[in-house]
Amino acid sequence: MQISPPPGDPAPLGATSEVGRLSTVVLHRPGAELRRLTPRNNDQLLFDGVPWVARAQEEHDAFAQALRDRGVEVLHLDALLADVMALPEARTSLIAAAVDDPRLGATLRHATTAHLSGLAPADLAATLIAGLAHDELRGGRGLAYQVMERGDFVVPPLPNLLFTRDSSVWVGDQVAVTSLAMPARHRESTITAAVYAHHPRFSGAEQLYGSELEHLEGGDVLLLAAGVVAVGVGERTTPGGAERLARRVFARGLAHTVLVVPIAQERAMMHLDTICTMVDVDAVVMYPAVADHLQAWTVTAGEQLPDDDDTTELSVTGPQPFLVAAAAAMGIDRLRVIDTGLDPVTAEREQWDDGNNTLALAPRLAVAYERNTVTNAALEAAGIEVVPIAGSELGSGRGGPRCMSCPVRREPL
Ligand SMILES: NC(=[NH2+])NCCC[C@H](N)C(=O)O
């Protein structure tokens, strides 16, 4: 076991805010899966370029170290996965997910299953993440295998596993394994599901959602305050996903209000956390071009039928301006807004480079990409201490410090 449970009686897992002191986080250090990116496949694999992998790893190591320096325990997803790949049940389900692809056909599916089943736990974990190229499958057979291009993948790689925010999200003491919208990311949540179900670090954690349900991605989920959850709906999370999550958090007593926030269906704003993240109990950094138009539907619980998560009546009001709805739900006078950039062009550039995508380590202490100098200066001027990290290569997948982290334990405020 690479990652053992902490000794004694540790603080419970979970998070009720975006800004409570961060104590444990799951990251994924990018590896061989990033070396799979080429100019021919990068669009489909959701990267805007072909990263320099060694530099991306250096940047990621510095990110992890910056967190550790501030007392955060960093867990690595590949190590958690390698641990659970020693367990027959977890192996079987992830191998099945890896070959559940109509491109393969029965013969190649069999050969691939046999190959994966023969791998030692750490090798299987590595292969599930990096994928399996045509020429790496010795003993490949079948029509599909013969016709397949040499550069193609029998099992496609998962370069976006780097963005651990999206494949699971904790709401209170329960974890939602999400349902990722883009085909290139679908398999990621089979990995998080196996880790949460089988790893002793998470034993007893109740699962709130599932990869088979309506699309929902963690980057769209913001814990505005204890009991108040904002869910962006757009390119990734669907209104149906927000509805299902709302019913479940109400039924389980994890929240009293869910704000459903429509966002533009475009790459620059794929998740709510690309335009808005929290940096204090009552402050957000936000893209000014949308700050005033963003609307929210306020969803609260109506009658709940006993023993069923999915039948709670929902009461829906709105829409009204997001900032107004958020302050009302949070029980504060006003949500303070710090702008990305100063002028519209700088704002657009810094939004694109994840200037909005900060990771709070505590109230008024946030990790941000160093390149977004204007936004970071605005944060400092507003009393937010910025922990700057390099992200020239990491950012080529369009994700910042928040996207690259899944908080599993934050202290309550
Ligand atoms: N929470 C986030 N904003 N995640 C960013 C994910 C970026 C990734 N390349 C994708 O397109 O899915």
Image (cartoon, rainbow, N blue to C red):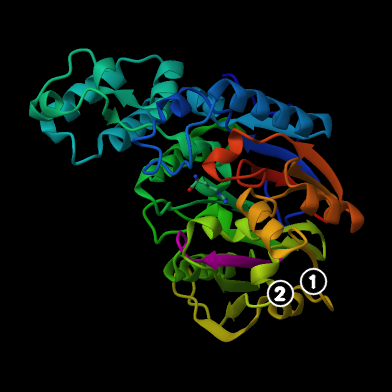
Is label 1 in a helix, a strand or a loop?
Answer: loop
The answer to whether residue 157 is seen in the rendering is yes
Contact between labelled residues 1 and 2, with CB atoms less than 8 Å apart: yes
Percent across and percent down for residue 210 are 43, 53
Residue depicted at 76% across the width and 73% down the height: 330
Residue at the image point whose x is 35% and y is 36% from the top: 41
Dividing the picture into quadrants, the one containing residue 86 is: top left
Please state the horizontal and vertical placement of residue 82, each as a whole percent of the image.
Answer: 49, 23
- Residue 292 vertical placement versus 350 (above, below): below
Q: Residue 346 or 190: which is nearer the viewer? A: 346
Q: Quadrant of residue 43?
A: top left
Is residue 201 shown left or right of residue 118? right
Q: Magenta stretch: residue 229 in it?
A: yes
Question: Residue 178: which disc?
Answer: none
For marks 2 and 1, give the CA distance.
Answer: 7 Å
For this rendering, which residue is in front, 298 or 313?
A: 298
In this rendering, position of residue 352 left or right of residue 216: right
Residue at position x 72%, y 75% in the image:
323
The local crowd at label 2, few if under 14, some if 14 to 19, many if 20 or more residues have their Cα within 10 Å, is many
Start and end of the magenta stretch? 227-237
Q: Furthest-left residue in view? A: 143
Decide whether residue 409 is among the magenta residues: no
Q: Amino acid at mark 2?
A: Ala
Instruction: Say which quarter of the image contains residue 121.
Output: top left
Q: Which mark is residue 335?
A: 1
Q: Residue 154 location in percent, x, y?
A: 25, 28
Asked whether the viewer can see residue 204, the reply is no
Name the element at disc 2: helix
Q: Amino acid at mark 1?
A: Leu
> Which of the numbered marks, if any, corresponds to residue 326?
2
Quarter holding the C terminus?
Answer: bottom right
